Amino acid sequence: MTGFREESELDRKTFFALPGADQLAPGDMMPIDLPGGRCIAVYNVEGTLYATDDRCSHGNASLADGDLEGFRIICPFHEGAFDIRDGSPAGYPCTVPVKSYAVVSQDGVTGLFIAEDEHDQD
């Protein structure tokens, strides 16, 4: 035993609660503002919650104002699309992915973890 433990990836992440996310009905989505200026879009697909950054990487639009079609969010600005499971572009003109996040439950609170070096960025 060395007297110390290795720092895990979770040690460098901060948990953010997503108030109201667990109340989303299947097919619904909502934006949630986090401390530090980041806005997250949360989606409910068939009872499972997914989250991405809310800002489209192609234009200044809220993805939570778009249309959810299965696992694809259609941006309201130019109708480009992203896969909400991993943030990958799923429709032209979007070519740059948006950040996606795993939604988890911690001590009965729905939320997500964001790396410390990312949570104050927008």
Image (cartoon, rainbow, N blue to C red):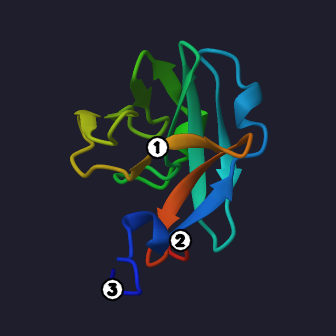
Q: Quadrant of the N terminus?
A: bottom left
- Look at mark 3 in the image and give the residue it sits on: 2
The image quadrant that residue 42 belongs to is top right
Give how far across and how far down residue 37 sits, in percent: 63, 70
For marks 3 and 1, give the CA distance: 33 Å
Residue at left offset 41%, top offset 53%: 59
For marks 1 and 2, give the CA distance: 15 Å
- Look at mark 1 in the image and give the residue it sits on: 102
Give how far across and how far down residue 13 sits, in percent: 50, 68
Marked residue nearer the N-terminal end (1 or 2): 1
- Look at mark 2 in the image and give the residue it sits on: 119
Callout in the foreground (1, 2): 1
Residue flagged by tag 3: what amino acid is it? Answer: Thr
Query: Element under label 1?
Result: loop
- Residue closer to the observer: 30 or 61: 30
| Residue farthest front in this picture | 1
Give how far across and how far down residue 86 sits, in percent: 32, 39
For marks 3 and 2, give the CA distance: 32 Å
Marked residue nearer the N-terminal end (3 or 1): 3
Callout in the foreground (3, 2): 3
Residue flagged by tag 1: what amino acid is it? Answer: Ala
- 57 to 77, vertically: above or below: below
Left or right of 108? Residue 16 is left
The image quadrant that residue 24 belongs to is top right
Query: Element under label 2?
Result: loop
Left or right of 66? Residue 58 is left
Give how far across and how far down residue 30 sits, in percent: 67, 36
The image quadrant that residue 23 belongs to is top right
Marked residue nearer the N-terminal end (3 or 2): 3
Give the tally of numbered discs: 3
Q: Do the residues under discs 1 and 2 have CB atoms within 8 angstroms?
A: no
Residue at left offset 40%, top offset 85%: 4
